[in-house]
Image (cartoon, rainbow, N blue to C red):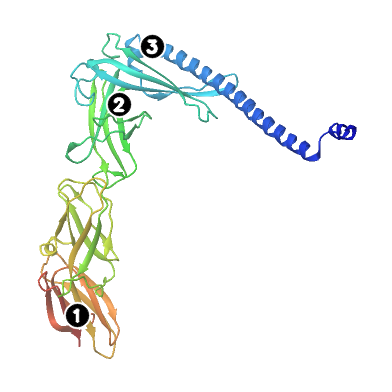
Amino acid sequence: MDERRQDDDAGFTLLEVVVAMVIFGIVASSTAVVLVRAVGGSSDNRARAAAANVAAQTMDALRQNAQTGQGYTDLTTRQLADVVVQGRTYSVSTSVSVVLKAGGGSPCTSGGLSDEVYKKVGVMVTWPAAGSVKPVRSDTIVQNPGVATDLTKGALGVVVAGPGGLPEARVPVTLSSGDAKLTDDSGCAYFSGLAGGTYTATASAPGHVDQSGAATASQSAGVQAASATVVNLPYATATTPRITFATVGADGNADPSYTWFGTSAYTLKNTAADRSGSTATNTVSPTLYPFASGYDVWLGPCAGEAPASRVNFATLPGTSPQVAVPVGGLAISNTSAASVDVVVRHTDSTSCPTSYTGTLPAGVTFRAALPFGQWTVTSAGGAVASPAAVTLTSGAPTAAVSFP
């Protein structure tokens, strides 16, 4: 019995020591994580408290300045000077929107300076390494102090709209002065507190185009003291059609054996815009403004080539329609023992001198995709192919000629 008591008092075994160390490590690690989070949270709380003070002080200063007509007019969306608190830099910006009299509608379409009732003002404060901590924001309204406007300043309303006058909301608009705003739900970006002069307003948003197909839309306008000027910017999400020019055989299927004769011109028009061009392949994918009336497209540069092959396709913002345009096909064979410099000329319209040239080796047949119409094929030396002329139409889209 004494021996057993001695064994019980002999101490911990190696296994018990290892288990105890593992348990201690787990507890220590958990405690360290809690301490690190507590320290980090304390730092974030201090930064947020400082940011809240910066926002409050900025808002107080804005309210104080806006008690005069000058200060109220100058109250616009802008980036303010950075503020440094205890070695940490805070970025401060304001967002300002105008509210008009009841029923006044958009500041771009009615009211103007004299109908401003108040401005919604927001102050945003951010700082580096904020992590998951949200920026501090403070919002208020600033009443018009009873002075309609600083008589030395004016305003500019920029209306951004797509086809049919549909407003384009949340589109960035920048003035040549550097002022920038997003359009509201009515498509209006309203800039007040502007000195008299000429300003260029530019709208720029991913995937949007103006009526010429440009990625940005710009318009210049003059601003006069104590008045509001309005400009309109047609700008919308682009449509990107895939237009394929194809020779259709007697079986009604596209025949890919008819290929391009070098570079071919094509016509792509709306009554308000011309997006014609040229291509070395049978498919083009232009970026277009989505006119409600759509576009007409055909192969060739001339209106005389259009009647049989003109295709009108609808364009809606953000869509990619598939457009098939029928064209003719002419098989040109050289059965002589020498190569021939070929001239293929469009002859049914003196106002459309379309022609294609190329060298055709002996014993070769070239199948050319061409606009509909009447064509003659000659050699540079004056030899005429047989038959002398062919006419390609939607009813008879293909033909063949040969040398000699």
Between label 2 and label 3, give the one nearer the viewer. Answer: 3
Task: Tell me if residue 299 can be seen.
Answer: no
Residue to which mark 3 is pinned: 63
State left or right for residue 362 relative to residue 396. right
In the rendered structure, which disc, 2 or 1, sits on the residue that comes first in sequence? 2
Residue pictured at 19% horizontal, 84% vertical? 402
Q: Is residue 7 left or right of residue 321?
A: right
| Label 3 crowd bin: few (<14), some (14–19), many (20+), radius 10 Å | some
Q: Quadrant of the C terminus?
A: bottom left
Which amino acid type is marked by label 3?
Answer: Arg
Quadrant of res 375: bottom left
Residue 197 disc label: 2
Q: Label 1 near label 3: C-beta < 8 Å?
A: no
N-terminal-most mark, 3 or 1: 3
Secondary element at tag 2: strand
- Residue 314 appears at what percent x and percent y? 17, 51
User: In this picture, is 397 found above or below 198?
Assistant: below
Find disc 1 in the rendering and name its residue. 378
Say few, some or many: other residues with alpha carbon within 10 Å of mark 1 (under 14 / 14 to 19 / 20 or more). many
